Image: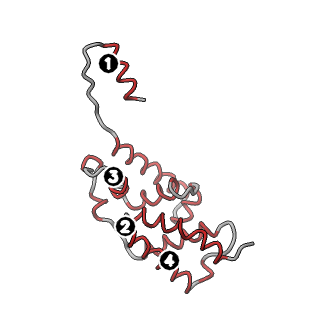
Amino acid sequence: MPDVSDQLVTLLPYLRRYARALVGDQKVGDTYVRICLETLLQEPSRVQAGPEARVQLYALFHEVFTRTGVRDAQSDSLSPSELTDLTVESRLRALPPTERQALLLTTLEGFSVSQTAEILKVPEATAAELIADAWSLVNQQMATTILIIEDEPVIALDIAGLVND
């Protein structure tokens, strides 16, 4: 079985990617990862070698992240209709923090709903609800209205079908 430090070396790039996506900034994300690793140095028993090391590491990261009291006031106040910058980063920041975390854990990092619940320290039903809410908000951000102007009804229906697809 690999040593926990060997596992951490392989997991670290993924944790950094997640942290950067979560906070929307490379430097700040790396700072949270550093704080997480410093905590792990002080309390090495927090992550055990084995198949659950990844979940344990992300759970520790979230504990550190939550303990700092990070709240993105900008994102909490945005509604999908107020979103003017359509970049992925802006769309992620427009999600409430907990929903953003659940969405990124499942889509970016590939955790299951039960693993996400364990990482966020919430019941599995709550984690599933957070993910569903996040997808609902993402879909609202992407919703738009299209007006098709065509005087031939058959062509207009064909275009409408293409747009819907």
Q: Quadrant of the C terminus?
A: top left
> Which of label 1 and label 4 is nearer to you?
1
Q: Quadrant of the N terminus?
A: bottom right
* Amino acid at the residue labelled 3: Thr
Q: Which of disc 2 and disc 1 is earlier in sequence?
A: 2
Q: Which residue is mark 1?
A: 156
Q: Position of residue 74 (x, y in %)?
A: 27, 62
* Amino acid at the residue labelled 2: Asp
The image's colouring method is secondary structure
- SS at mark 4 in the image: helix
* Amino acid at the residue labelled 4: Cys
Would you call the spot at circle 2 few (<14 residues within 10 Å), some (14-19), or many (20 or more)? few
Residue at image location 60% in from the left, 73% down from the top: 9
Q: Which residue is mark 4?
A: 36
- SS at mark 3 in the image: loop
Q: Which of disc 4 and disc 1 is earlier in sequence?
A: 4
On the picture, is 117 further left or further right than 155?
right
What is the C-alpha distance between the residues marked 1 and 2? 44 Å
On the picture, is 85 further left or further right than 96?
left
- Cβ atoms at labels 1 and 4 below 8 Å apart: no
Q: Which of disc 2 and disc 4 is earlier in sequence?
A: 2
Q: Which of disc 4 and disc 3 is earlier in sequence?
A: 4
